[in-house]
Image (cartoon, rainbow, N blue to C red):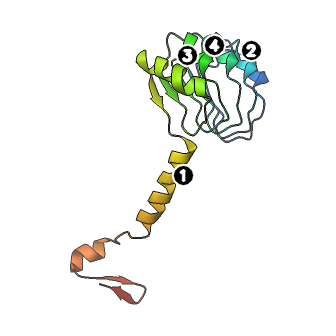
Amino acid sequence: MISLKVLDIDGNDVFDLGALAPLSKITWIHASRNNISDISSISPLKNLTSLDISHNHVSNIDSLSKLTKLQWIGLAFNQVRDISPLNSLAKLRYIDIEGDSFNHQSTRTHIPNLEARGIEIIRWTSLQVSRLVRLATKVADCCLLYTSDAADERSSVDLGGRRII
């Protein structure tokens, strides 16, 4: 297990990443949809290039500044307010911060600085996501039913004895 390079523990009710500390060769961790709040124990994982901790309870990402090989990070839908620890990551290319509510300094300074470096940032806010969900619900209420039967008859569809025209 010490030579493990890829780990997918998505949706496993994990709350502690401490057991990963000895995995010095690991390069990719997918740990979204768990109950993780503290990620400080992954700071020794110096070979990590991809980390997805989306949909957890993480608020402090200071330990990520030590992961100098990180290229991709998923932080979506956590409780992160300060993104400044990512400024020191020279190899970073992609950040997903969708649904997180950042402090003023992160919004006005750190995020634009990261974007200026060419880093792709996905950053829908919680408010934007909720508006999108409401819009999708409205669109779903007025969808047109189209089946192969409709295509064959070109005028109507029979759904359990009822004819939809």
Give the x, y percent position of residue 72: 52, 23
SS class, disc 2: loop
From the viewer's perspective, is the residue at label 3 or at label 1 nearer? 1
Query: Mark 2 = which residue?
Result: 22
Taking the image as shown, residue 103 lies to the left or right of residue 14, namely left
- Asked if one can make out residue 140 in the rendered structure from this viewpoint, the answer is yes
Give the x, y percent position of residue 153: 22, 80
Question: Quarter of the image holding residue 54?
Answer: top right
Taking the image as shown, residue 112 lies to the left or right of residue 152, namely right
Chain-order first, disc 4 or disc 2 = 2
Give the x, y percent position of residue 42: 71, 18
Position of 60 relative to 127 (above/below): above
Position of 153 relative to 15 (above/below): below
- In the image shown, does 102 or 152 lie closer to the viewer? 102
Residue type, label 1: Ser
Query: Mark 3 = which residue?
Result: 70
Query: Mark 1 = which residue?
Result: 130
Q: Distance between the residues labelled 3 and 2?
A: 18 Å
Residue type, label 4: Ser
Q: Which quarter of the rendered picture does the C terminus lie within? A: bottom left
- In the image shown, does 154 or 1 lie closer to the viewer? 154
Which numbered dot is residue 105?
A: none
From the viewer's perspective, is the residue at label 4 or at label 3 nearer? 4
Q: Which residue is drawn at 54% across and 52% down?
A: 130
Q: Which residue is drawn at 65% across and 30% down?
A: 80
Query: Mark 4 = which residue?
Result: 65
Taking the image as shown, residue 75 lies to the left or right of residue 132, namely right
